Image (cartoon, rainbow, N blue to C red):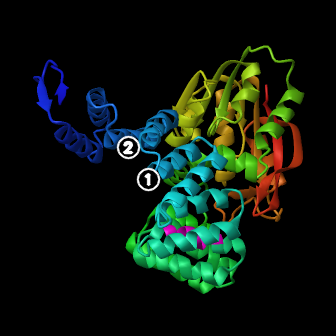
């Protein structure tokens, strides 16, 4: 029996366990998450070994990025029912969210050993293998997953990614098209199809993908942005807010592991090395903004200089990860230019690693940064290098802008920012190739 305690508005109610679980699931599906969590908790007080309550509360915690709590709950299921393949698969998902990819892989393999026809476990195994650039092995897992779940658009999309990474572009195009047949509005599959058509020099097919996509959702700024990125015309001055939120919310759980372990990501270190050369010994006396803070990779490097360290980002998922570092005094979800426009002479340093590549025209963000800096304050940032110095900036198929060095210098000058230092560097790898960029430290003119 589960007894719901009296509140000012609700009298005491006693429910059977099954009735309480049914109500909790209804609340959960209706997105009444605090109420659902409270009821799951009451069920577990009465029946600590209730596998369903442990399972669904674990999923609730996982989807709220409370991965440690989720791991504990699902671990209890495995202790009670060690042959539960679903529990091993779910624990793998939680461990992947914690950036523990090798342990997640072991969980997926255990689930498959217990139940060889577990389609989601095969798919998830493919995900962790792809994160380590093991496309061939991932492809084996995805093929098994799609055979077991032929109606899953997600599994076919993932297989398309593995085929593209393996260089089999025609097969990747077929996989993406199959995913879209199953789910016609599946945005990432449409984007993957268009990009792969371009890689395969099938430009007319890529253009047709966007035309059909836009016919279903005319004027959608995200689709128009991706169309401009892939086809090279009609580029906006910056990426749409919704696009940035969507991309980085989706990446939040695996962001650090993917960047650091697989892309040799160096932008935060390079940026702070350049800043350190312009600053005195750290004395924790400066007001600093981490602009586009993401999961907070810059925070440990900025913290020794900071009296007050704030982070701003559009992605709620990224901010949730940054909060877990316990390094920021404030974390704010906002569009960067709008936020800076409201912060007159607030910061000694504005640091921005790998964020301004989502801005094409830099004058507005540089002007806003100059207004938000104190006299003699520093704006430090990284950008990706343009191969064409005749163009101020260019939107590329991967959805980021590249900038010419002459344009960057001119935009800083217009904003009243003097270049303190500028250097070339490899910021990270992409598709196993180096990404060349600029590391810039500028100072507000007196």
- The quarter of the picture where the N terminus appears is top left
Q: Position of residue 330 (x, y in %)?
A: 56, 24
**Picture layout, residue 290 above or below residue 362:** above
Residue density around tag 2, few if under 14, some if 14–19, many if 20 or more, within 10 Å = many
- Looking at the image, which residue is at 77% across and 45% down? 382
Q: Position of residue 153 (x, y in %)?
A: 45, 70
For residue 192, say whether it is visible.
no
Q: CA distance from mark 1 to mark 2?
A: 9 Å
Judging from the image, what secondary structure is the residue with disc 2 in?
helix
Q: Quadrant of residue 186?
A: bottom left
**Picture layout, residue 395 above or below residue 69:** below
* Residue 444 counted in the magenta span: no
> Do the CB atoms of the residues marked 1 and 2 lie less than 8 Å apart?
yes
Q: Which residues are magenta?
A: 155-162
Closer-to-camera residue (361/312)? 312
Mark number, residue 86:
1
Q: Position of residue 235 (x, y in %)?
A: 61, 64
Closer-to-camera residue (124/190)? 124
Left or right of 260, for residue 343: left
For residue 137, say whether it is visible.
yes
- Looking at the image, which residue is at 54% across and 72% down? 144
Mark number, residue 244:
none
* Residue 159 counted in the magenta span: yes
Left or right of 128, for residue 189: left
- Looking at the image, which residue is at 61% across and 82% down? 171
Residue density around tag 1, few if under 14, some if 14–19, many if 20 or more, within 10 Å = many
Residue located beneath label 2 in the image:
55
């Amino acid at each position: 029996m589960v007894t719901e305690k009296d509140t000012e508005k609700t009298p005491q109610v006693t429910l059977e366990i099954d009735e309480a679980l049914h109500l909790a699931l209804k609340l959960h599906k209706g997105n009444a998450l605090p109420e659902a969590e409270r009821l799951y908790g009451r069920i577990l007080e009465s029946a600590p070994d209730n596998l369903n309550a442990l399972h669904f509360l674990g999923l609730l915690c996982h989807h709220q990025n409370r991965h440690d709590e989720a791991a504990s709950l699902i671990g209890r299921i495995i202790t009670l029912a060690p042959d539960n393949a679903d529990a091993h698969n779910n624990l793998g998902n939680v461990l992947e969210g914690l950036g523990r990819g090798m342990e997640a892989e072991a969980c997926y393999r255990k689930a498959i050993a217990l139940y060889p026809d577990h389609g989601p476990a095969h798919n998830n195994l493919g995900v962790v293998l792809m994160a380590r650039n093991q496309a061939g092995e991932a492809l084996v897992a995805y093929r098994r997953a799609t055979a077991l779940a032929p109606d899953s658009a997600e599994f076919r999309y993932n297989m398309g990614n593995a085929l593209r990474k393996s260089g089999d572009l025609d097969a990747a195009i077929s996989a993406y098209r199959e995913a879209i047949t199953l789910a016609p509005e599946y945005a990432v599959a449409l984007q993957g199809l268009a990009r792969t058509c371009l890689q395969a020099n099938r430009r007319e097919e890529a253009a047709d993908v966007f035309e059909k996509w836009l016919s279903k959702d005319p004027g959608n700024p995200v689709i128009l942005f991706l169309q401009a990125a892939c086809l090279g015309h009609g580029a906006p001055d910056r990426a749409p807010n919704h696009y940035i939120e969507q991309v980085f919310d989706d990446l939040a759980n695996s962001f650090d592991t993917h960047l650091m372990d697989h892309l040799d990501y160096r932008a935060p270190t390079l940026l702070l090395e350049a800043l350190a050369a312009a600053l005195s010994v750290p004395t924790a006396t400066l007001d600093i903004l981490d602009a586009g803070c993401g999961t907070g990779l810059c925070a440990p490097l900025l913290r020794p200089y900071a009296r007050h360290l704030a982070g701003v980002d559009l992605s709620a998922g990224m901010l949730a990860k940054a909060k877990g570092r316990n390094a920021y005094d404030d974390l704010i979800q906002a569009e960067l230019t709008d936020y800076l426009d409201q912060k007159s002479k607030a910061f000694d340093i504005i640091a921005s690693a790998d964020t301004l590549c989502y801005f094409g025209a830099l004058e507005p963000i540089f002007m806003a940064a100059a207004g938000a800096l104190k006299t003699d304050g520093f704006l430090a940032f990284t950008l990706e290098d343009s191969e064409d110095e005749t163009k101020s900036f260019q939107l590329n198929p991967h959805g980021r802008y590249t900038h010419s060095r002459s344009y960057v210098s001119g935009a800083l000058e217009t904003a009243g920012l003097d270049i303190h230092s500028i250097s070339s560097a490899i910021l990270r790898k992409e598709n196993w190739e180096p990404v060349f960029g600029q590391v810039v430290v500028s100072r507000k003119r007196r």
